[in-house]
Image (cartoon, coloured by chain):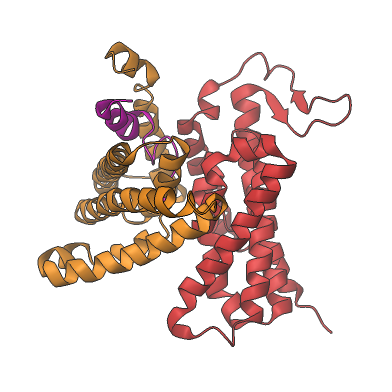
Chain colours: A orange, B red
Amino acid sequence: MSYIAILLTFIFINNFILVQFLGLCPFIGVSKSSANAIGMGASVTFVTTVASVVTWAIYYFLLVPMHLEYLQTLTFILVIASLVQLLEMVIQKISPALYQALGIYLPLITTNCAVLGIAIINITNTYNVMESFTAGFAAGAGFTLAIVLMSNIREKLDLMPVRRAYRGMPIAFISAGLMALSFMAFDKSLLTNLHLV
Amino acid sequence: MKLNWNELTKGIFKENPVFIIVLGLCPVLGVSTQVSNAIGMSAGVLFVLLFSNLLISALRNFIPASIHIPAYIVIIASLVTITEMVMHAFVPAVYSALGVYLPLIVVNCIILGRAEAFAARNTVIDSILDAIGMSIGFALGLTLIAVIRELLGNGTITLFAMGGFDGVIRVPWFYNNPMRVMSLAPGALLLMGYLKAFFDWKGARKKEA
């Protein structure tokens, strides 16, 4: 598959939040203001991109030669957890400004389904290292797109007269459902029409 | 010995993980297109949650506080790997239908959440009851969503094939008039919104009464 096809697939066609429901907890939890949503989106994109490459390398250079493929889940979650810790320390050292912006979101990312999800999907789809890198970045970008759109909707919703039972989470889910409905306009035929497959 | 039944029942309604505390939604919305997948997922969560609560509450005095999260993750990930291998061997159809959501039980907030909030500071017996209650609550929530989505979206209820029964119940009228959107992604989010609103409304009414 070409890189453009992978980008389109993970940002629009199989958007991680709106189509695959990976990473819903931060999507509902951190989407109340757009500043937070951008911070969370940037952190997730960073981690999914780095984690895709690192887990790819661990799988093909460590697990496959030793015939330990069944330890995939266990290894990946430990690698992701340590990677997030490491990134936190590196960012704190190199760029205190970036750390100020992303610091509070990084610890939350370890238990974000999106990161483990993309690592496993890369292996299932037998991507090579560049394809994994692209898929990791695109999955993060799709997550950012959805969470930023959602935060804008929720900032407007705060000013709207919403029935009491629907306030907060229920109306957020229904808005997300309507957004998902519009994302259904992107499907696999898009790739065929653009001659990418 | 006296069993603390309250620990069992609280997970089913009062602290239902799906509708009241809203945890672990990725699998709930992801696998609820067919009732059989929902049941498979619930069984996986029951197994992992039961044994993670059991092991963590048994080891709670031996795990140093500074590394408790990595220790919990190792326990949970090992249990998930066991679940994956057992399902792959005995119910391959469910294994492939659950796909990426099965390994993702590791990062399901319910399991780590119960380990952290309950098993780490309660006895083994109470933790087992808590795990069973929470799993039943999770299974009820997930199955409810799956039944509604499959019935409206496809007009069928898919269970497991047994003998001459192919496992699929075709419901009259609904089977000829499916609302396809319910079995697609937007239907899951819309349904979750309406159900959450319903449970919030019920909760608010109970508080006023």
Give the quarter of the image for residue A132. top left
Residue most toward the right? B163
Image coordinates for residue A78, horizontal then vertical, percent: 44, 63
Q: Residue at x 40, y 41 (%)?
A: A122
**Where is the C terminus of chain A found, in terms of image quarters?**
top left
Q: Is residue B70 left or right of residue B144?
A: left
Q: Residue at x 50, y 32 (%)?
A: B187
Residue A181 seen in the figure: yes
Image coordinates for residue A77, horizontal then vertical, percent: 45, 59
Image coordinates for residue B49, horizontal then vertical, percent: 64, 63
Q: Is residue A71 above or below residue A134?
A: below
Give the quarter of the image for residue B15. bottom right
Magenta segment: does it hold A13?
yes
Image coordinates for residue A143, horizontal then vertical, percent: 31, 43
Residue most toward the front? A65
Q: Is residue B145 left or right of residue A50?
A: right
Front-most of residues B85 and A110 = B85
Front-most of residues B191 and B39 = B39
Q: Is residue B153 left or right of residue A103?
A: right
Q: Is residue B143 left or right of residue A28?
A: right
Residue A23 seen in the figure: no
Magenta segment: does it hold A3?
yes
Question: Exactly how many numbered labels are in the figure?
Answer: 0
Q: Residue at x 31, y 30 (%)?
A: A6
Residue most toward the bottom? B61
Give the quarter of the image for residue A100. bottom left
Front-most of residues A96 and B85 = B85
**Where is the N terminus of chain A found, in terms of image quarters?**
top left
Q: Residue at x 23, y 71 (%)?
A: A89
Q: Which residues are magenta?
A: A1-24
